[in-house]
Image (cartoon, rainbow, N blue to C red):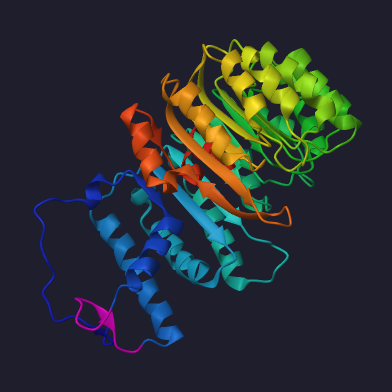
Amino acid sequence: MDKINNNLLPSSTLFNYPRFIKYLNTGSIFYSISKWFETLKPGRRYFLLDSDSGSVLEFKKLISMLLFKLFIENEVNLHIFEIEVINYLPFDFYLDDILELILQNQNFIHNIKNFKLYIMVDYSIDNIKIKSINNRISEMISNSHQILKRVVRIVLSYISFPIYQSLLLSNNCSNSLNTIIFYHIDFHDIINLDKVFEQFNVLESVHIFKCFSLNNFTQQIINSTKPFKLKSFFLSEMIKIESLELLLQKSCDYLENFWYFFMYNDHDLQLLELILKYCKNIKFLDLYNFKNQFNYLVLDLIEDMRQKLNYLTIDIHYFTEPNSIILRNLGQKLPLKLEYLCLELNIYTNDFEIFLKNSQYTFINKLVIKNTSGDHDNMLSCIKENIMKKKRVKYLAIMDAVFDEYNTISENIDLFSLENEVKEFEFYNIIVREYIDLKFNLTDISFEKI
């Protein structure tokens, strides 16, 4: 503390703010401390006299420890606790001591209901600090029998499974856990998954996002005698069609969220046919990178799901040919109301006008468009005439590509950056948002929207 200039008395508050904290993420805490440190200058309440890298690291660690001690002393009543472990020196430098502090004061997490682990490390790297963190989390799990009995939701993420295995094989949360989310998990060496899921008595949903070695996973799951309530399946690797069909047969009544990145082989066609055959309750459909040969099958899929469909993304803007077939036939396939529609296509005005005409009775709460055709001005006029003046959306985001003389994209124009255009839409009670803000990404869906 001798390196910190503090010439003011600490301020007092009349309200115990920490006591009302319900959500805590270790990564967010450390990031906020780093951003706060950047504001420290001579003359401010706190500043560091000696700012070599070692002192800075120790200072940030001190602040993080003081914050967590403050939370503990004020008897914070946490409901959601998220631990992030990443291969980044400052964060793992802080986290090891924080976890030790929590292990010494387990009342800090005695009321948590949502426990999330984001472990983004490669355990092939020999990192003593990371291994220590691994051991502390394992100890926290093994010592927290009463806590786990109240946990209802767990997020397990990234490539390493040792910690997760001890958690899932424990029967402490068998009567409380209702949601499991697998995010970027490699199931290659995992065994006894059928037994793991057999022990969960109130499990309501399982979510799989961009995981690996799914053939191994499915072969074990289909042996389970209990229903496998797969609610989200975001598929980014090839899986044996036979295994996939068995999985869908077991889970089709529960599957609501489906995401697929096309791989340009016979597997794509077979997969779409299986989804069309078995999955009748899809609410969220996200299809990436398919070629024109799949246009009509995709359109059939959307029409078949129309009764339940609420979120739809079609992203095929990587190809140079116009997406005329999709645009000219999509409008009449849509339900009367959509919460979210995202079109990332090569859009030409003639095709888009047909889409708008065919979808004129559909209200879209959030419409996101990324147009890579270069036909910017004509399309904007079309949107004003057919969407803005008819008030067919509530939120709108548009990103348009601009091409140079070499026919390559030189810049992207966001409608949000055009002040006069934004005001014109506001006059019709349409809120223009920045493209990156309104567009859903995978973590939005997997961690926040389920």
User: Is residue 392 shown above or below 95?
Assistant: above
- Residue 169 belongs to the span the image colors magenta: no
Q: Residue 310 appears at what percent x and percent y?
A: 54, 20
User: Is residue 233 shown above or below 49?
Assistant: above
Query: In front: 422, or 350?
Result: 350
Q: Quadrant of the N terminus?
A: bottom left
Q: Quadrant of residue 110?
A: top left
Q: Residue 71 appears at what percent x and percent y?
A: 28, 56
Would you say residue 176 is visible in this rendering? no
Q: Is residue 238 left or right of residue 194?
A: right
- Taking the spot 73% from the left edge, 65% from the top edge, the residue there is 124
State how many labels appear.
0
Query: In front: 28, or 331?
Result: 331
Q: Residue 345 appears at what percent x and percent y?
A: 67, 36
Q: Is residue 292 left or right of residue 417?
A: right
- Taking the spot 27% from the left edge, 80% from the top edge, the residue there is 41
Q: Quadrant of residue 254?
A: top right
Q: Which residues are magenta?
A: 41-50
Query: In front: 296, or 177?
Result: 296
Would you say residue 221 is visible in this rendering? yes
- Taking the spot 59% from the left edge, 10% from the top edge, the residue there is 307
Q: Residue 240 appears at what percent x and percent y?
A: 87, 32
Query: In front: 237, or 131?
Result: 237
Q: Main secondary structure of the magenta part?
A: loop
- Taking the spot 57% from the left edge, 44% from the top edge, the residue there is 400
